[in-house]
Image (tube, helix red, strand yellow):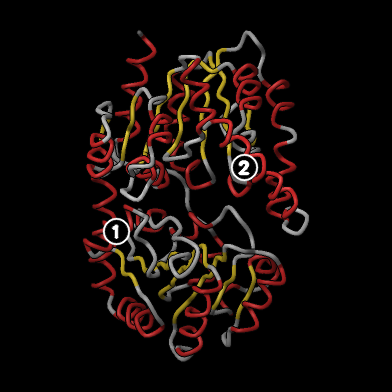
Amino acid sequence: MYLIYQFLSQVAFLGIRLAAIFNPKLQLFVAGRRNSFDILQAKIEPSDRVIWFHVASLGEYEQGLPLLKKTRDAFPSHKIVLTFFSPSGYEVVKDKTPAAAVLYLPFDTFSNAKRFLDLAHPEWVVFVKYEFWPIYLKTLRDRKIKTLIVSAIFRPSQAFFKPYGGWMRKSLRTFNHFFVQNETSKDLLSSIGFENVTVSGDTRFDRVGEILQRDNSLDFLRKFKADQTCLVAGSTWPEDEALLVKYINQNKAKKQKYVLVPHNIKQDSILILREKIELPTVLYSEISDKNPADFSVLIVDAIGLLTKIYAQADLAYVGGGMATGLHNVLEPAVFGIPVVIGKYYDKFEEAKQLVACGGVISVSNQNELNEALNGLFNDVGKRAKQGNINNTFIGEKLGATSLIMDYILSMTRK
């Protein structure tokens, strides 16, 4: 079965290489992997003591960052190797992470897994949330390298829990311990014979909790907002923007401010978005030459500012829920403001819980968006109530990182 899987993986990678000719993101995916082993050889010596963290993309990196930092502090004599699957994570953080070596995970083949583990020679490994690569996991198991998965979440639809999923279930035997987000995940694992499970919650709550401890001030945004109520729409996709632009244009007479932070900041896309807005609009890239208070809409055509921008908001819209997949609702929620999202959020546990308790509003169409935003813009008491729900919810979820770290310290003493 492993040989069939490896053959199919190699065919898939060939297909990706061909598709990369026409896709810049896939070009990064392919080209970045050419350097992975060179980075390892340059950064990791045979005598180094190493801990390996693997994440899929930027969201999982942010999720695992509190644990990565605590690991670095608790094991100062070790080097941390951090691997990514996706360019959207690696390209953003490759130059600003606590890890000693940051690289793309080489494709899941026996030769790659052997070479990677020979060069990295980790004492133990942490996978964040998911990413079940059967050959890497088999090789780790064969070498008896202690392996954990943290902030994991399992669903009945996954192959592990199907009658045909026996081969995939073997991959789970690699993990010495599962730290899962909820009781459902624990029950699912128990149903297939895994009892080495702790419901720790989500380390992402600890990550957003750290945000409150830093300086989140932005002078240009303070001047832009002035004394008006401000909506920040973060990580928006075209499907989100179509609704938001229509709302903005329908409410031109109101003294309201809007900050749009698109997921795609390519210049042509930004200019198309700007042309659709009928209110005075300024780009972040040009705001230093203008008086921010003269504009009603600010489009942020830069990365790395969103969290601080949320800190200045009175209400937030988090994008992705109308199309490709919801982005992080916790980043704005931690600031004690109400949040609006699209209709596709079922795969995001924290969003489901926040919708259920009333801190987040899910909308499915233009009318529902209009109703939700009007209600929040017009009622300061409603904003305060929903914001407090979000703040309290996050405060009650803190502590997963410390629980996992206690286990790691105990594990490494054995």
Q: Quadrant of residue 339?
A: bottom left
The image shows residue 378 at horizontal and vertical percentages of 31, 81
**Residue 102 left/right relative to 57:** right
**Residue 45 left/right relative to 163:** right
Q: What residue sits 33% from the left and 42% below the top?
A: 163
Q: Residues within 10 Å of mark 2 (few under 14, many from 20)?
A: many
The front one of 116 and 68 is 116
Q: Residues within 10 Å of mark 1 (few under 14, many from 20)?
A: some
The image shows residue 382 at horizontal and vertical percentages of 25, 72
**Which quadrant is home to the C terminus?**
top left
The image shows residue 67 at horizontal and vertical percentages of 42, 31
Number of callouts? 2
Q: Quadrant of residue 291?
A: bottom right
Residue 320 circle label: none
The residue that label 1 is drawn on is: 352
Question: Which type of secondary structure does the marked residue at label 2 adopt?
Answer: helix
Amino acid type of disc 1?
A: Lys
Q: Is residue 14 above or below residue 301?
A: above
The front one of 314 and 70 is 70
Residue 90 circle label: 2
Q: Is residue 201 above or below residue 258?
A: above
Q: What residue sits 58% from the left and 79% below the top?
A: 294
Rounded to the nearest angstrom, the CA distance separating label 1 from label 2 is: 28 Å
Question: Which type of secondary structure does the marked residue at label 1 adopt?
Answer: helix
Q: What residue sits 39% from the left and 80% below the top?
A: 365
Look at the numbered discs 1 and 2 and tell me whether their residues touch, using CB distance below 8 Å: no
Q: Is residue 313 above or below residue 83?
A: below
Amino acid type of disc 2?
A: Tyr
The image shows residue 200 at horizontal and vertical percentages of 28, 35
Q: Quadrant of residue 335?
A: bottom left
Going from the N terminus, do you reach mark 1 or mark 2 first? Answer: 2
